[in-house]
Amino acid sequence: MVKEYDLLVIGTGSAGSITATKCKKEGWSVAIIDDRPFGGTCSQRGCDPKKVLVGAAELIDWNKRMQGKGIEEDSKINWTELMEFKRTFTQSIPEDTEEKFEKLGIDIYHGKAHFQCETELKVCSDVLKGKHILIATGAKPFEMNIEGEEYLTMSDEFMELEALPKKIVFIGGGFISFEFAHLAARAGSEVHILHRSESALKHFDQDLVKMLIKRTEEIGVHVHLNTPVNGIEKCGNSFVVKGEQDDRQVEWKADLVVHGAGRAPALDIDLEKGNVKRDKQGVCVNEFMQSISNPHVYAAGDVASSDAPPLTPVATTESHVVASNLLKGNNKTANYPVIPSVVYTVPKLSSVGMSEQEAIDSGLKIYVKSQNMTEWFTYKRTNERAAAFKVIIDQEKDVVLGAHFLGGGADELINLFALAIRFQIPILELKQMPFAYPTIASDISYML
């Protein structure tokens, strides 16, 4: 028996749940499907629990920095207790999410969805037909296609470890590897990051990345650039990671090997049967987030092939757009203002707007100001070892084009510059704004 709905939503994270909820509140019949615990990645296996864990690393770092400056006792991470604390944020999410959907009258299905045709999905033994289908399945770890890939531990598994291994190798030089490496090293593990090219964290300002790498190595993490990995072998209870370095074969022994080589759209749902065209970035969509090959289908979040980065605020924005277009007909396009991005290492690294090279290539008359801030009061009072900024200014319009920060307050400071860029706030006004003093914001005038 085929069950019919106005809308079928695959995925229960931000990209799917917003559209499902809005359409249901307008009287639509809605079903939502997920083969993992309801609630999505960010709240359970991504951003939120990660930041809980990173908080412990920040405390350890702050404590060590202040040794001899009024602080005497050294602190340590109790991994078991930290995991228990993290679960207080995540363990109730699946049940709470299902309860929310049930109260709204949204039908829930547990299982893997597969297209049967343009308007039908099969979930276990159920066949569901939808006038409209939203794909919001998010991303999954990129397939590395190396020998022994099955021995890799994924990021969500890392965040559920009952005990932290003594030796850990992270493959890839992106967000996941650097963030977890900073945590693991401060929790007492020997940590290596293996990255295939010469530029880690490639979407961030490379001058600041180099400073971050130096600080990363100072806390004991071994960062190996230009080191592609070609295999993993299991030896008893441990592993041997094989790679290349300076045209020679090298090996690292590890108790755990973590996948940090990026993520790809999770689209193993038989798109061909649904006549849904895709590319490397995900489902090919038009300006309304609608499939270019199947008008019944929309996509949002990490799974949609758009110009926006795979971030939670983008997924939220796109889900609102899809809801509007479903309820009112295609009327709204996805608008991506400048979106700040943060790497939650210790210190943090952040970026918004144009990079220095993009600004140079634009042909605009620019001015770039950059400086090491470790001797500024804001960072000297907490004895920070790495703090710097780079601000790119359009000299003719007298506005900020891009901003990049390294330091303990980089995650909050970047939001202020995102506002400045989006609303084209003149430099003079930013310099004259009387921010609370002394705060990271009160340093802004000195940066301009």
Image (cartoon, rainbow, N blue to C red):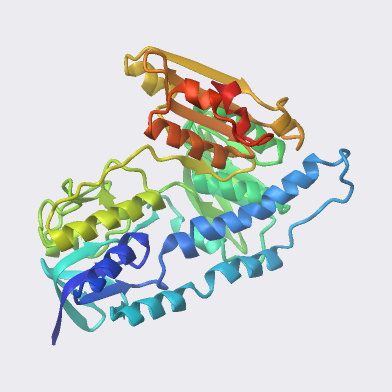
- Relative height, residue 144 to residue 245 (above, below): below
Residue at the bottom extreme of this rendering: 1
Q: Residue at x 40, y 72 (%)?
A: 38
- In the displayed structure, 441 sits above or below 261; it is above
From the viewer's perspective, is residue 9 above or below residue 109? above
Where in the figure is residue 419, as x and y percent of width and height? 44, 36
Where is residue 77, by image quadrant? bottom right
Query: Is there any visible trace of residue 380 in the rendered image?
Result: yes
Q: Nearer the viewer, residue 189 or 422?
A: 422
* Vertical side of 69 occupied by 158: above or below: below
The x and y percentages for residue 23 are: 23, 68
The N terminus: image quadrant:
bottom left
Q: Please state, as top left, top right, bottom left or bottom right, where the C terminus lies in the image.
A: top right
Q: Residue at x 53, y 55 (%)?
A: 233
Q: How many marks?
A: 0
Residue lying at 12% horizontally and 58% vertically, measured from the top left: 329
Q: Position of residue 266 (x, y in %)?
A: 32, 58
x then y, percent, for residue 146: 42, 50
Would residue 172 be seen by someone viewing this image from the given angle? Answer: no
Residue at 63%, 37% in the rendered image: 436
